[in-house]
Image (spheres, rainbow, N blue to C red):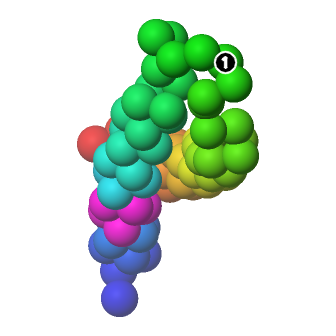
């Protein structure tokens, strides 16, 4: 297999992973915003659920950063189009 084709395939796979992860991140952000309702008294906030989702968000963002770094590395290897 041509090396360039191999890297183009890997890049496309990573782009699809990043797009999927971005959607999941947006969903988690929306969910956190709903849970962090400013009209509720502090004692009624779902603290444990907020904490759990915040940790999940952090993990997803870190995973996205790793994927984006891999895409950038592949782009560097492929060079200008």
- Magenta run includes residue 67: no
> Which residue lies at the image location 61% right of the left edge and 30% below the top edge?
45
- Tell whether position 16 is magenta: yes
In the rendered image, the vertical position of residue 81 relative to residue 43, given as above or below: below
* Neighbour tally class for label 1: few under 14, some 14-19, many 20 plus, Cα within 10 Å: few
Q: Which residue is mark 1?
A: 42
Q: Residue at x 49, y 32 (%)?
A: 35
In the rendered structure, the answer to whether residue 63 lies left or right of residue 5 reads right
Q: Residue at x 40, y 61 (%)?
A: 17
7 or 20, which lies in front? 20
Residue 22's spot in the image, x, y percent? 39, 44
Which residue appears farthest toward the bottom when viewing the image?
1
Q: Secondary structure at mark 1?
A: helix
Horizontal arrangement in the rendering, residue 78 relative to residue 61 (left or right): left
Which is more toward the observer, 50 or 30?
50
* Quadrant (top left/top right/bottom left/bottom right) for the C terminus: top left
Location of residue 1 (image quadrant): bottom left
Q: Establish if 78 lies above or below 3.
A: above
| Camera sees residue 60 | yes
Q: Residue 19 at x, y = what percent?
A: 33, 50
* Residue placed most toward the observer, 52 or 65: 52
Give the percent coordinates (x, y) of residue 47: 70, 37
Towards the viewer: 41 or 13: 41
Magenta part of the protein: which range? 12-18
Where is residue 46 drawn, in percent x and y?
Answer: 62, 38
Extreme-top residue of the structure: 39
- For this view, does 39 lie left or right of residue 61? left
Residue sitting at 45 percent across and 26 percent down?
Answer: 33
């Amino acid at each position: 297999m041509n090396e360039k084709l191999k890297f183009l395939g890997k890049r496309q796979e990573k782009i699809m992973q990043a797009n999927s992860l971005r959607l999941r991140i947006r969903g988690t952000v929306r969910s956190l915003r709903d849970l962090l309702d400013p009209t509720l008294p502090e004692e009624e906030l779902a603290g444990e659920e907020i904490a759990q989702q915040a940790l999940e968000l952090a993990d997803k963002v870190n995973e996205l950063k790793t994927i984006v770094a891999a895409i950038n590395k592949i782009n560097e290897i492929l060079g200008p189009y």
